[in-house]
Amino acid sequence: MFVDLHDGYLNGLLIEAETTLILHCKTEDGRACTFTMPGMVRLRANNFREGNIIFELNIYQGPECPIELVKQLKEYEEARTDEMLSKDMEIIVQGNWTLVELTSSYGCDLLALFDCPAAAARYDVPDVRIKSASSPKAAITPER
């Protein structure tokens, strides 16, 4: 199940067992959710702040992976960019690797590369809504 995260929040990220990335998010309407992806080989997350507002979450696989995003993620030495980028793109395409891009309206932008297909991703959205801290009711209530 995929939930639109536009104008939702990135509340945290966790790297588990060195290669599994877990993104803790909240949708615009208050649903807590996690995006979990195993096989991480590279991660770049910039500008993490309080209240990271998500613009969009894009998932690319194999030949769909934009070369410019791979270039940003890998941060090649200027003199070897073309040579290394070409080799890496060949590995990404042949291995059907996955590139995850999270862009923000405010706060954290994230790029992550995984050595497995996008089908390995898990997207969990519990049937609960997170209430604001100023609400007099419980912090988490069942969705009705």
Image (cartoon, helix red, strand yellow):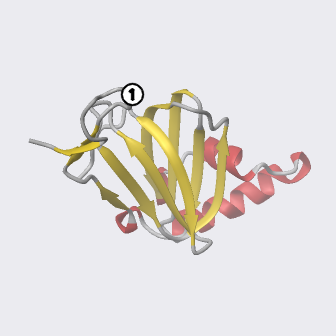
Q: Residue at x 40, y 62 (%)?
A: 118
Question: Residue lying furthest bottom in this view?
Answer: 17
For the residue marked with disc 1, what is the amino acid?
A: Asp
Q: Residue at x 72, y 53 (%)?
A: 74
Number of marks in the rendered image: 1
* Closer-to-camera residue (3/60): 3
User: Is 52 rendered above or below residue 120?
Assistant: above
Residue 97 spot, x, y in % from top left: 51, 64
Residue 116 spot, x, y in % from top left: 48, 70
User: Is 7 rendered above or below residue 122?
Assistant: above
Q: Is residue 118 left or right of residue 17?
A: left
For the C terminus, the image quarter is top left
Question: Residue lying furthest front in this view?
Answer: 136
* Closer-to-camera residue (70/81): 70
The image quarter containing residue 25 is top left
Residue 9 spot, x, y in % from top left: 44, 35
Q: Is the residue marked by circle 1 packed among few (<14), some (14-19), or many (20+) residues within 10 Å? A: some
Q: Residue at x 38, y 63 (%)?
A: 121
The image quarter containing residue 55 is top left
Q: Is residue 58 left or right of residue 139?
A: right
Residue 7 spot, x, y in % from top left: 39, 27
Q: Residue at x 33, y 46 (%)?
A: 32
* Closer-to-camera residue (69/45): 45
Residue that label 1 marks: 7
Question: Residue lying furthest right in this view?
Answer: 79
Q: Secondary structure at mark 1?
A: loop
